[in-house]
Each structure stands twice: as structure tokens, then as C-alpha cells.
Image: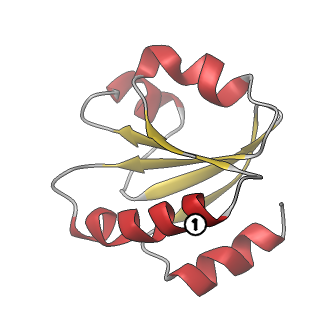
Amino acid sequence: MLKKIKEDEFETVVLKNTKPVIVDFFATWCGPCQMLMPVLKEIAEEREDIDIIEIDVDESRDLAYKYEIEAVPTMIIFINGTAIDRIGGFYPKAELEEVLKRYI
């Protein structure tokens, strides 16, 4: 599943999720973010064992501050509501899938 959420949905959709979740903190004005979106969509369509959530840092500033997002794109991997790793920048699909194999 690939879904864009707002800050008020974060606890339910991410922290209480029983599946591993990749949260992509992005901005609409960010070139690498735009390059990453099709990669995340493709992974989300191929895999049912993870959820991929997009959060616009300009719309969810408090959440971006809480998770210390200093650059976009930044992806944080959550398992059982705990942030276990963060990945910064654009990753091609094959490289991102290699990173995910460590956790999922």
C-alpha cells in the first residue's frame, strides 16, 4: 500500500501498524523526491508485506521536526511502531530493495 497521510493520521497508520512501514518524508518542490516517488509506488504495488507512507514536510512540520528531518527525501523504517533506520536521498529500486532486505 502507498498512501499519503496527514500528521493526525500518523499514530494510527504508522505507529499502530502491524506491518513494517516505510515513511517517506518528502516535499513537492524536491527533485530527488519526485524521482523517488515512482520507485516507492512500484515497490508498494509489488509487496503486500509492507506499507509505504508519504508525508509532505511542508504540510506536517511538527512531525518532520519530531523525527529530525533535515533534508528530503528521508525515509524512516518503522517496525512495531519503532523507528529502526533512516535512509536519506534518492535510491534506485534495486538498491532500496537491498536495504529493505535487512529488515523485512
- In the figure, 82 relative to 96: above or below? above
Q: Which of the 4 image quadrants contains residue 97?
A: bottom right
Q: Position of residue 45 (x, y in %)?
A: 56, 60
Tell which of 46 and 15 is nearer to you: 46
Which amino acid, mark 1? Ile
Question: Who is closer to the viewer here, 55 or 74?
Answer: 55
Please indicate whether residue 39 sits to the left or right of residue 29 in the image: right
Q: Which residue is mark 1?
A: 43
Q: In percent of the image, x 71 and y 74: which residue is there?
A: 99
Image side of residue 78 versus residue 87, left or right: right
Residue 104 sits above or below residue 5 on the image: below
Percent position of residue 57, x then y: 32, 38
- Residue 69's place in the image compared with 61, above or below, is below
Give the camera-side residue of 85 and 44: 44
Residue 68 is situated, as x and y percent measured from the top left of the image, at 49, 40
Q: Secondary structure at mark 1?
A: helix
- What residue is rendered at 46% in x and 61% in y? 41
Image quadrant where one finds the C terminus: bottom right
Label count reads 1
**1 and 69: which is toward the camera:** 1
CA neighbours of label 1 inside 10 A, class few (<14), some (14 to 19), many (20+)? many
Residue drawn 72% across the image and 53% down it: 48
**Residue at the outermost top position:** 8
Residue found 47% across the figure and 56% down from its top: 74
- Looking at the picture, the colour scheme in use is secondary structure
In percent of width and height, residue 42 lies at: 50, 68
